[in-house]
Image (cartoon, rainbow, N blue to C red):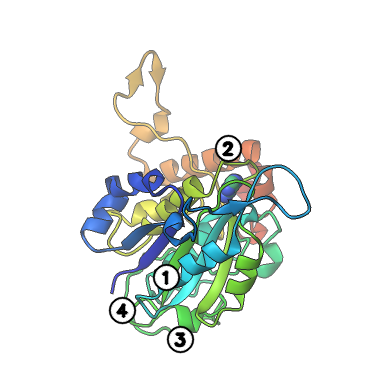
Amino acid sequence: VAPRVDVVTIFPEYLAPLELSLIGKARVSGLVDLRVHDLREHAHDRHRTVDDAPLGGGAGMVMKPDVWFEAVEAVVADDPRDLVVLVPTPSGTPLTQAVAARLAVELGGLRGDHRETEPADRVGPDGLGGLPGDGGDGTDGAGGPDGDGGPEAGRNRDDAAGRDGVPRVRGLVLCGRYEGIDARVVEELREHPRVSEVVEFSLGDFVLNGGEVAAMALLEAVVRLLPGVLGNPESVVEESFGDASEPLLEYPVYTRPAEWNGRAVPHVLLSGHHAAIRRWRRDASLRRTAERRPDLVRRLDVARLDGHDREV
Ligand code: ADE
């Protein structure tokens, strides 16, 4: 059984890019089962109305709870797995690499690697780890031995992640438009016996016209972490946030020619001196992070910094 995610939207065509590139290939080769559904199929009236005026007044329209709930029930009827419901909204908790990695572990039916990477006391409200999760990179493959490693970090980890690479849960993304979905839909789903978790997530402190682009961002972040999707799993670890315990921005990268337009690449990268290159990259990451994301620097684990790090 492939990891499965269903997306419900009033603009199925908006998600057409999920047929391209890495995700498109993963779908064709059966590494992930992604399905997109039209919310309007579940509207009742001739005009296929999905929204209504906000109670209490105000601008815009609110999506109707009955239409949404019927759509959810219809979409999930064909497969008995429990659900992780994902709702993009600017009022959600921040989507982070740690959240994406945890979802990849759960949706992929992976064991997770039980690394203790996000101690609760270092997770701020605006943190990389806005949700419980172990930050596992999800690339250590399915079907590993049943670890007797650390305590289960995520809620419902036992239910969600099989020990055999068989997903116990499926994802369901609800894309709202307008002023959002009537809040009772999420309330109802949180208490639904088949729902193991509801995650209302935000891409950041800005407002999109609807959840579709955010759903695509989430899917891209999660699907690339599923086993077999990336050719080179190491690139997952090296990139920004790849190591959730040390959230640093990635260092700048260069390719040939070594001099272009009068600009030379940093000399050390041509030296063949691997320790020096590692040191240069780490310095560049630290400097870049300090400049662009001081919030991340404050959360670095002091115990893991060496003397040279401190000088940077
Ligand atoms: N829908 C509208 N704005 C959004 C945002 N910033 N993140 C996620 N979903 C959204």
Residue 153 location (% of width, % of height): 56, 76
Residue type (three-letter) at the residue carrying disc 1: Ala
Tell whether label 3 touches label 1 (CB within 8 Å).
no
- Going from the N terminus, do you reach mark 2 or mark 1 first? 1
- When asked about the image quadrant of residue 120, the answer is bottom right
Alpha carbons under labels 1 and 3: distance apart:
39 Å
**Crowd class of label 1 (few under 14; some 14 to 19; many from 20; radius 10 Å):** few
Alpha carbons under labels 2 and 3: distance apart:
38 Å
Query: Judging from the image, what secondary structure is the residue with disc 3 in?
Result: loop
Q: Which label lies toward us, 1 or 3?
A: 1
Residue type (three-letter) at the residue carrying disc 3: Asp
**Crowd class of label 4 (few under 14; some 14 to 19; many from 20; radius 10 Å):** some
Q: Is residue 211 above or below residue 283?
A: below
Alpha carbons under labels 4 and 1: distance apart:
32 Å
Alpha carbons under labels 4 and 3: distance apart:
14 Å
Query: Judging from the image, what secondary structure is the residue with disc 4 in?
Result: loop
Query: Judging from the image, what secondary structure is the residue with disc 2 in?
Result: helix
- Going from the N terminus, do you reach mark 4 or mark 1 first? 1
Camera-side residue: 267 or 201? 201
Query: Judging from the image, what secondary structure is the residue with disc 1 in?
Result: helix
Residue drawn where x is 49% and y is 68% of the image: 70
Residue type (three-letter) at the residue carrying disc 4: Gly
- Going from the N terminus, do you reach mark 2 or mark 4 first? 4
Q: Which label lies toward us, 4 or 3?
A: 4
* Residue at image mark 4: 143
Q: Residue furthest right?
A: 56
Q: Which label lies toward us, 2 or 4?
A: 4
